[in-house]
Amino acid sequence: MYLKELNILNFKNLESASFAFSPNLNCFSGSNGAGKTNILDAVYFLSVGKSAFSLTDRQCVLHGRDFFMLDASFDVSSKGAEHVVCSFSKDKGKVIKRNDKDCKRLSEHVGLLPVVMVSPADVYLINEAADERRRYINHFMSLTDSEFLGLLVRYNGVLAQRNRLLKQSTVNMDIIDVLDMQLSDLAARLFNKRIAAISDLAPVVSHYYKLISDDSEPVELTYKSEMLSGEPLYDILKRNMERDAALGYTSSGIHRDDLVMKIAGYPIRKYGSQGQQKSFIISLKLAQYEMIYRLKGFRPILLLDDIFDKLDAQRVKNLVSLVAQHKFGQIFITDSNKVRVDSLLDEVTDERKLFSVNSGTVTEVCLIYPSDAATDKAR
Ligand SMILES: Nc1ncnc2c1ncn2[C@@H]1O[C@H](COP(=O)(O)OP(=O)(O)OP(=O)(O)O)[C@@H](O)[C@H]1O
Ligand SMILES: [Mg+2]
């Protein structure tokens, strides 16, 4: 699956831009603030139905205009062409159309044309509180497991009901007991799914970290949950009932779980250098990419925003070799450092394109044909 053509109107600082992309590597170079990340965000928007940077749809409209439109054509090997249009206007709100048909709900669209984005903003996964990491793992799992989101919505519904009861002056223990049974059942199913996904993901993260860092330090990704003890949530809830009633909320359950990230045995948040943290995040996202590929059977689009930033020369070299391999399908990569972009373009042997971005205006600089026979690896 790859993005063939894209037309952008009034999206952030991109007033009007048209692209015909390479199915392999597409590089964007230009100075700070030129609009490189905005192009990647437009591609992300087409896949996920919202910006990758916690912006509202309205904030993505070019200042002074009242709508934006992203019009794209994807090549999906099993189905031929997919025409996707995402637009937002002050009057009509957000509209997503696939092959001229309205997607009534975002969930009908998300996951069909998957992308994986690696961006400097991702360090939030290391530095922010546990709820951000849970949100990340939940989003990742809902892309790969169709049952997961429904179970999570039900769990959150029961949890909200239980918390409402706990806030009342006299707590109805009969109703709490029924809710505890439901919560315990849903928690067990969600816990099993999460633990299975993280067990699959963790060795792939270590594998990529090894490749990027020349095996300089081991990293670990593990799942932290009270339920790892094997005790049913029902029993834990009963044990903590007095505390929960005093607090007015449910203090145990899978809504309190976390992902633990370690480097050489120590928490990466406190002990990892900026380059090590960046290497970990890239490894995590590439592992996520691989999981989606394994489960869906086709390669997502890989969006690499400023990935070389903070990395030393050797890690940049390792990453360039990794990206240059035929492992990934279509790649979009931004860098303000033209020398690094050129070295990447030299390394890759497939057809590849370079775009220059300048104050929201994009020019195709060159299309480099493959030295070997063309491959259709991106399909
Ligand atoms: N809604 C908007 N309307 C107009 N301009 C916007 C809007 N949102 C963001 N911008 C502008 O987009 C520019 C940032 O673009 P972007 O983040 O893509 O830059 P970049 O090329 O990736 O730069 P860097 O190399 O620093 O990462 C800023 O100048 C910002 O003011
Ligand atoms: Mg940028």
Image (spheres, grey):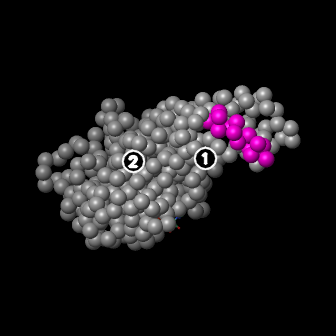
Which label belongs to residue 202? 2
* Residue 166 horizontal/vertical position (percent): 78, 41
Which residue does the image show at 61% across and 47% down from the upper left?
256
Q: What is the count of numbered marks?
A: 2
* Residue 95 horizontal/vertical position (percent): 56, 42
Earlier in the chain: of badge 2 and badge 1, it is 2
Q: Quadrant of the C terminus?
A: top left
* Badge 2 vs badge 1, beta-carbon distance below 8 Å: no
Q: CA distance from mark 2 to mark 1?
A: 20 Å
Mark 1 surroundings: few (<14), some (14-19) or many (≥20) residues within 10 A: some
* Magenta region includes residue 179: no
Q: Which residues are magenta?
A: 233-246
Give the secondary structure at mark 1. Answer: helix
The furthest residue to the right: 169
**Could you tell me the amino acid type at mark 2?**
Ala
The furthest residue to the left: 372
